[in-house]
Image: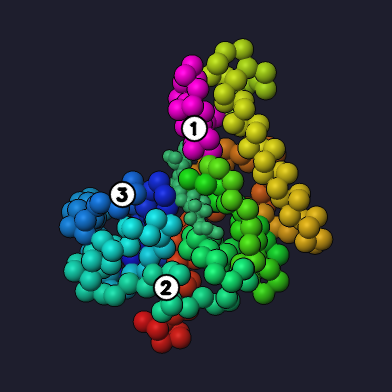
Amino acid sequence: MLLCIDTGNTNTVFSIWDGQKFLAHWRISTDHRRTADEYFVWLSTLIAVQKFELQINACIISATAPRVVFNLRVLCNRYFDTRPLVVGKPDCALPVAPRVDTGTTVGPDRLVNTVAGYERHGADLIVVDFGTATTFDVVDFDGAYVGGVIAPGVNLSLEALHMGAASLPHVDVTRPPRVVGTNTVACLQSGIFWGYIGLVEGIVTQIRQERQRPMKVVATGGLAPLFDQGFDLFDAIEDDLTVHGLRLIHDYNKEMGNV
Ligand SMILES: Nc1ncnc2c1ncn2[C@@H]1O[C@H](COP(=O)(O)OP(=O)(O)O)[C@@H](O)[C@H]1O
Ligand SMILES: CC(C)(COP(=O)(O)O)[C@@H](O)C(=O)NCCC(=O)O
Ligand SMILES: [K+]
């Protein structure tokens, strides 16, 4: 069984692949201070609840927060007796190399999204990931990551408004009934909801114009469905896109004899 670990800046997803399907997806808040032992206690509890026998013999990690990698490596070594593949490290090969400026370190989550998106949807694709940041990852004709866009994340924008403006409360992201809000909460929700609809539409249109070709758009991340309500922004929404990509990259490295 393969353990796929996707660490975003806010949450970390652990997914178990049994060779045919994902048996479970578990989520824990990202904290670089969390030790290998803490991860294992948490994992063991969830495994016990699910009542399946876990035989992990391979691990792959994507970490946008580099400081978490140390403890995750210890987890894999100590508890699963395996050396994990870490996306972005030299010993983890990608099916197609990214084409970006020399010296740029692309977020591993974006590379993984690219691999997964290309496998499922083919070339000329934009992957939109609603995480801590909202990222747009552009996939070229041959599956290469060729750059994209990084915009502030939905919750981060709301949090920034709340922190910077004394009279603005924290609000949940939702689609407000009207564009013109008649109270503070409704005004904030409108700004975020319609602002993001505009942001996604605008950026996708600009990318298509710049590249002068049709491009499919696939969205992932917990908030993707919220922004899809009747707007036809996305050709597909896929919750499991990043962990699917991790599995593909692990398989590829296995074929190459790297693991
Ligand atoms: N279904 C959801 N509804 C509301 N907020 C969500 C949902 N899923 C994720 N979020 C929020 O979106 C933000 C990004 O979450 P996540 O996708 O886990 O980010 P990352 O991958 O950067 O860690 C977080 O603030 C999280 O609480
Ligand atoms: C853009 C990101 C912050 C997104 O991270 P996330 O929202 O998934 O936590 C991450 O991919 C990152 O740190 N990237 C490095 C710079 C780059 O991708 O070009
Ligand atoms: K993201």
Foreground of the two, 239 or 189: 189
Q: Percent from the top left, x then y, of residue 116?
A: 54, 65
Contact between labelled residues 2 and 1, with CB atoms less than 8 Å apart: no
In whole angstroms, how far apart are the C-alphas of marks 1 and 2?
Answer: 33 Å
Q: Is label 1 within 8 A of ligand 1 (CB to nearest ligand atom)? A: no
Q: Is residue 157 magenta?
A: yes
Span shown in magenta: 154-174
For badge 3, the amino acid type reads Asp
Foreground of the two, 189 or 56: 189
List the residue tagged with mark 2.
89
Q: Residue 160 got which mark?
A: 1
Please report the residue visible at 31 percent of the width from the left and 49 percent of the height from the top. Answer: 31
Q: Residue 224 got which mark?
A: none
Q: Percent from the top left, x then y, of residue 187?
A: 60, 20
Q: Is residue 131 left or right of residue 38?
A: right
List the residue tagged with mark 3.
31
